[in-house]
Amino acid sequence: MTIDPALLDRFAAIVGAAHALRQADDIAPYQEEPRGLFGGVTPLVLRPGSVDEVSRIMALASETGTPIVPQGGNTGLVGGQMPDENGEEIVLSLSRLNRIREIDTSSNTATVEAGVVLQVLQEAAAEKDRLFPLALGSQGSCQIGGNLSSNAGGVGALAYGTARDLCLGVEVVLPTGEVFDDLRKLKKDNTGYDLKDLFVGGEGTLGIITAAVVRLFPMPRGRELAWVALSSPEDALALFAMANDRAGGGLTAFELIERTPLAFTLAHVPGTSDPLAEAHPWYVMLEISSGRSAEDARASMEDLLTGAYEAGLVADAAIAQNETQAASFRHLRESMSEAQRPEGGSIKHDISVPVAAIPAFIARAGEAVQAVSPGCRVVCFGHMGDGNLHYNISQPVGADKRDYLALYRPMNDAVHAIVRDLGGSFSAEHGIGRMKRDELIATQPAIATDLMRRVKRAFDPAGIMNPGKVI
Amino acid sequence: MTIDPALLDRFAAIVGAAHALRQADDIAPYQEEPRGLFGGVTPLVLRPGSVDEVSRIMALASETGTPIVPQGGNTGLVGGQMPDENGEEIVLSLSRLNRIREIDTSSNTATVEAGVVLQVLQEAAAEKDRLFPLALGSQGSCQIGGNLSSNAGGVGALAYGTARDLCLGVEVVLPTGEVFDDLRKLKKDNTGYDLKDLFVGGEGTLGIITAAVVRLFPMPRGRELAWVALSSPEDALALFAMANDRAGGGLTAFELIERTPLAFTLAHVPGTSDPLAEAHPWYVMLEISSGRSAEDARASMEDLLTGAYEAGLVADAAIAQNETQAASFRHLRESMSEAQRPEGGSIKHDISVPVAAIPAFIARAGEAVQAVSPGCRVVCFGHMGDGNLHYNISQPVGADKRDYLALYRPMNDAVHAIVRDLGGSFSAEHGIGRMKRDELIATQPAIATDLMRRVKRAFDPAGIMNPGKVI
């Protein structure tokens, strides 16, 4: 089945021919996503230039029962931004809604349109001596609308919260085309149900976020980054407790890294080098920030590391001596996902458990994955301070990639069973999209699925809003 | 109309006669609320002792179409916990569900039942060297379930967030009696729609929160409290910017106080005294905390106040020299609501505006209220750092209280019009309840009301869950 060309013309007329992509070459980038797992087909990509155009598109979609797939920077990892294979869904790109409407340094807020690239917002805030703390590997191309729709996390979530925590208000175009203007700058507002947080993390299935008010923070006066070697996840947990105790709110990153992802990175990413002289089984990359001064941050970091040495938690450590070195530490961490590619197939997990359960998870999952694929290599790294690990499993050396990837489902099942047992989540920060929808429905309590379906029906009774995603 | 006594017997049998209150004297405390504005009538108060009993009550309510009004510590200020006047609503008290199920010092979480009194949780956390930062004037009697259902704010919200921000997971009994167990300890969890935040702030209209996982924080090693005199709200805003800039996340309270509420407190609350030698038009009570040490907090406070003196923002200031003096400062602030009573009728507002708009709000509202009631006395105090003021208006000296309170509606209208114009909220932290329902519906965009009604219908199609509240 296909959409009637006359109907495509009506949609195209709303945005104008120049912004209605119908040629295969133009459409191609909107049909493919980073992992190449969820390609789809669409006859039309609409690039509206105003909220009013988004509204008119949805009104026409509602009138004609046409499914719409919103798309931001197309960096999502679960296929939430992809049309399906049937060619009956229209992609609506938010990229042209890329205006920063306001930066309010008194209220510490920014009002931004959905298509603003994350890094652009970070830089605009920095120009006003403010921090927008959301930071992701994809920040050069991902967009705020997608960050909010998927409730993105990242390194900064430890101290500043996820995208949801950073969002004070939203402007949403509903499936009917109605505009829900809830662009508030208020930290406290108890006027009825929290509708905002249905759209944030709703993955575009309840409406399209076209703009948002997000929180800004004073720019830290000092930041210290350390690369610390440890012998076990248990020691990392003890170090985390000590860091919380001594640095309190100043602890702004706490990333756990196993040797394997570092080794892959050193082997495959040009220009990288090991921050420490010898190899160690585990590392933590931790950041301490101070609102007061660079000296204050340095003193706090030294106090922590001294305590950690004395407690026997730390085998070796390097504090970045300047911004260049700090950038090189961060680059190591950010390259770890990509550095897996030359090592063959990778089966990925984006899990969270209560922080205290991290060592137990690593021990149990380490055994479970060997039972699924003997010789597979655990590539464990992530936001330990949030209980969130990217627990990726690279194929055994010399294995056939296709054969290995055929184990995706049993591997996921084995790991996620442990996650469930520990009270965790099998989608900590990437969302559900197409990838995890069946598993969500299969594993969560029936009442949760029922409640989510009720919400979906209440907001999108015709089912035209990013169908087949989440629920 | 009344409920059939045989049906009351069936409800009573679920909890047992000892916990089913049917005598007028026993019921009375559950029918009256702190301000005496929203008295109602109920034939039966149920005090279930387990989640299972709550579930069976709701199943029977659902089967028989009987409206249920959940009630916690009965400290709410908008009538959300009150039955109506018709005697057809049963009150369900959560007070006996008062177990702290777990305090997890590794994950920094507490799992608590709805009926746990806020102060009891604060103290249990402190025993484990952890901070539960929610702090309210009513903390000696209000309960966690009510705090979450009304998304309570308070002084600590500035640094640690509102009740919503502090809540990681909930256990909810739905109107049907089904139990939605979402008691997660996870900071990052993107498995579908954010259902939790519908119940948090839902004021018991979508389901009954029976337990929750809340976040704990490392206990600060040092806290410094200062009472600072200023000449204007503009100077307070400049001081707030400076405090954010210099203390960053260490700024844990920033309360704005006009002279009038302090004068009322000094006049009417025995044992109070002015922290400063002379009277000043405005004050800020601010707290700086340090995760590191008492000396660190003190140095940070002195650095800030020195800077503020040099900038000409501060006329005088007292730093509490010990915990007794700090407690006396806090007592002044907490007594301000009560200290209004001897001054006659008070028309209250619980508003928020963007922080930057606080001075404009105070200037404009100050004129507007005089137009409604010449000679009325503005009693302005509140959580300025959150943009949230308790903007109360005491009657003119010598006026008739009843005549004055007849102006409640026009006074509210005048103040709330300014709030709307400034992009603010007319219910910052107390909620909607019965008190503000009509105004919510009258003043918010129709699409917001429509969306809230859709949510209400999706969760409570029979309309038995705390009817007549919120929406």
Image (cartoon, coloured by chain):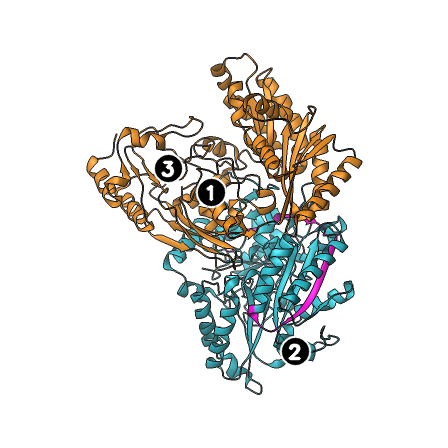
Chain colours: A cyan, B orange
Residue occupied by mark 1: B118
Q: Could you say where residue A151 lies in the image, as x and y percent from the top left?
A: 56, 56
* Residue B62 placement, left or right of A437: left
Q: Identify which amino acid the numbered label 1 is placed on.
A: Leu
Of circles 1 and 2, which is in front?
1
Question: On what subunit does the disc labeled 3 rest?
Answer: B
Between tags 2 and 3, which lies in front? 2
Return the chain for callout 2.
Answer: A
Residue B470, how many percent across, how many down? 44, 37
Chain on which label 1 sits:
B
Quarter the N terminus of chain B occupies: top left
Q: Residue at x 52, y 67 (%)?
A: A358
Q: CA distance from mark 1 to mark 2?
A: 49 Å
Q: Residue at x 52, y 82 (%)?
A: A404
Dot label at residue A263: 2
Q: Was residue A226 drawn as part of the magenta stretch in this picture?
A: yes
Q: Which residue is mark 3?
A: B467
Tag 2, which secondary structure? helix
- Left or right placement of residue B343 versus residue A439 in this view: right
Label count reads: 3
* Label 3: how many Cα within 10 Å (few below 14, some 14–19, many 20+): many
Screen quadrant of the C terminus of chain B: top left
